[in-house]
Amino acid sequence: MITMPVLQTELLDLLYELHGTDVKLIIGGGFGIYLKTDYVRRIKVQTLLTQWPEPRSTNDLDLFLRPELLIEPAKLKPLAEAITRLGYKVVKGAEKYQFVKPGRGGDKAGSIKIDILTGPQNRFEGTSVRTDSRRARPNPSVGIHAHPVDEALTLEEGLLSVFLDEKSGTGGPMHAEVFLPQPYTFLMMKLFAFRDRIDDTDKEFGRYHALDLYTILATTIESEWKQALRFRDRYRDDSHVVEAGRLVVKFFSSLDSLGMIRLRESSYYRLELQLGEFMSAMQELFPA
């Protein structure tokens, strides 16, 4: 099983290769949530909820690129070169935006996967980047595409800077900066991910997405909550925000809702988790 320290070493190796370039990575997914949990524990700040689940396991690194990197692809070339140098191979059918490094002896169970993502397709209107629902393609090509996430309306707003201070496996000690999405951004993405996985046996019927929603809210600090409420008011008429409100009503408004059932089915669920406060906060942030 891939542990969080192993993933952190892989990320540090990538950051070591990117040192001195214009590539600044936004870390999403389960590992981004782990980094946020670790951050708030270290600074010992009050968060929205006091009871957190343990960080879940994952073998994915979700790397979000600011649209400017795709619009000016020369800045993106070092990332493509670094991924190749570190031994990652393209995933068939998702070439240039998904990469995998097999475990020892080619073991699939011990593999590590990189997903390259970016913000909404409309960020690229009027640019040379060609987009569809699956890919944003820089022009000229530099060997990297990104999967657009249309519900990540606020991807570049309210980012949290986090420094990783450890030794890279391929180089010396690192003091590397990464960025974490604002909780509002994270919640939007996870709501839509849950919607897309509730019937997917290979993705545990969305259980880990439901758990992630709780953890994101639980580790939100006061200043982030206030900013999230401002985002709620600013984007309330956007179609994706309207859909998010519908999803909260359908899946996270009562203990009998499917989302709350999936959350309690998670192997990381604990009876101490503050489910009432979680549902209340979700409905405040994403009103119907």
Image (tube, rainbow, N blue to C red):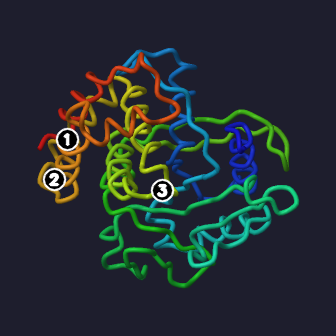
- Please name whichever residue, 113 or 232, is drawn nearer the observer in this view of the structure: 113
- CA distance separating discs 1 and 2: 8 Å
Q: Is residue 124 above or below residue 194?
A: below
Task: Where is residue 210? Give x, y as percent.
Answer: 39, 41
In the rendered structure, find residue 242 and report the number of the disc placed on it.
2
The image quadrant that residue 14 belongs to is: bottom right
Q: Do the residues labelled 2 and 3 touch (CB within 8 Å)?
A: no
284 left or right of 29 in image: left
Q: In this view, does 44 lie above or below 9?
A: above
- Mark 1 highlights which residue? 286
The residue located at (39%, 78%) in the rendering is: 131
The image quadrant that residue 4 belongs to is: top right
Task: Where is residue 164? Give x, y as percent.
Answer: 66, 36
Mark 2: few, some, or many residues within 10 Å (few <14, many ≥20)? some
Q: Which of marks 1 and 2 is nearer the N terminus?
A: 2
User: Viewer-nearest of labels 1 and 3?
Assistant: 3
Q: What element carries label 1?
A: loop
The residue located at (22%, 57%) in the rendering is: 240
Mark 1: few, some, or many residues within 10 Å (few <14, many ≥20)? many
- Mark 3 highlights which residue? 201
The image quadrant that residue 222 belongs to is: top left
Task: Where is residue 123? Give x, y as percent.
Answer: 33, 67
The residue located at (80%, 43%) in the rendering is: 168
- CA distance separating discs 2 and 3: 28 Å
